[in-house]
Image (cartoon, rainbow, N blue to C red):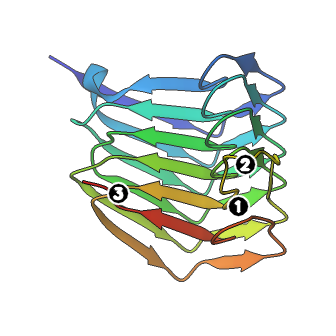
Amino acid sequence: MPGDLTIVRCVFYNNNALEGSSIYYLETAVKTFILKSSSFYQNIALENGAALFISGSTANSLIENCVFINNTSLNGGGAIYLQLPGNVTITGCIFSINNALDGSTLYYEESFNTTIIQNCNFTNNSFQQNDNNFGSVIFLSNPGNLSIIHNNFENNKGILGTCIYYSETS
């Protein structure tokens, strides 16, 4: 039976991986994932999720009061990549100087659950120029039930929907 995973006050610095260079998390392995007051600096993913990669659809995830600075993904999710996640709350986080092909801070792919992004600051995030990318700060593809509440977006760079790109396909 799956248990809980809690990470509090940790620093992840200068890590490299194919995906999720600091944390690669399959939600089916635990029932609740809590990440609080942790920092992610200068992490690189060759594919997706330079700091954090979450995949699966069973757990509730809370990402609270975390800092994501200068993380780079060569594909999606310069800081966080969510793929078929359970219920996710991202609150009180700082995203600055992150970079990716799409979703310089957050790439969100397919969900049937609820996600809340609130009270976060998104500043100086950018994208990697490519003929096929959208370069937004938050890239949403079929995100399910989503609320983006009381966030600050400042001095970010993108192509379509610099701050938020939303696509729903059937």
In the figure, 98 relative to 21: above or below? below
Q: Is residue 95 left or right of residue 103?
A: right
Name the residue that disc number 3 marks: 143
Instruction: For mark 3, give the secondary structure.
Output: loop
Among numbered discs 1 and 3, the one appearing first in the sequence: 1
Q: Residue at x 58, y 69 (%)?
A: 164
The reply to whether the C-beta atoms of the residues labelled 1 and 3 are less than 8 Å apart is no
Image coords of residue 3 (percent x, y): 25, 24
Q: x%, y% of residue 59?
A: 26, 38
- Which residue is situated farthest in the front direction here? 131
Q: Is the residue under label 2 in contact with that under label 1 (CB below 8 Å)? A: yes
Residue at 82% x, 48% y: name it.
129
Q: Quadrant of residue 84?
A: top left
Q: What residue is shown with label 2?
A: 68
Alpha-carbon span between mark 1 and mark 2: 6 Å
Q: Horizontally, is 134 left or right of 27 in the view? A: right
Image quarter hosting the N terminus: top left
> Residue at the location (34% across, 55% down)?
142
Give the SS element for disc 2: strand
Quarter of the image that includes the C terminus: bottom left
Q: Which residue is mark 1?
A: 94
Please name the amino acid that badge 3 sits on.
Pro
CA distance for labels 3 and 2: 22 Å
The one nearer the camera, 56 or 161, is 161
In front: label 1 or label 3: 3
Residue at 73% of width from left, 39% of height from top? 40
- Picture coordinates of residue 32 (x, y %)? 30, 37
Nearer the observer, 72 or 22: 72
Q: Give the distance between the C-alpha atoms of the residues marked 1 and 3, in whole angstroms.
A: 21 Å
| Residue type highlighted by circle 2 | Phe
Nearer-the-camera pick, 139 or 72: 139
Q: Which is nearer the N-term, disc 3 or disc 2? A: 2
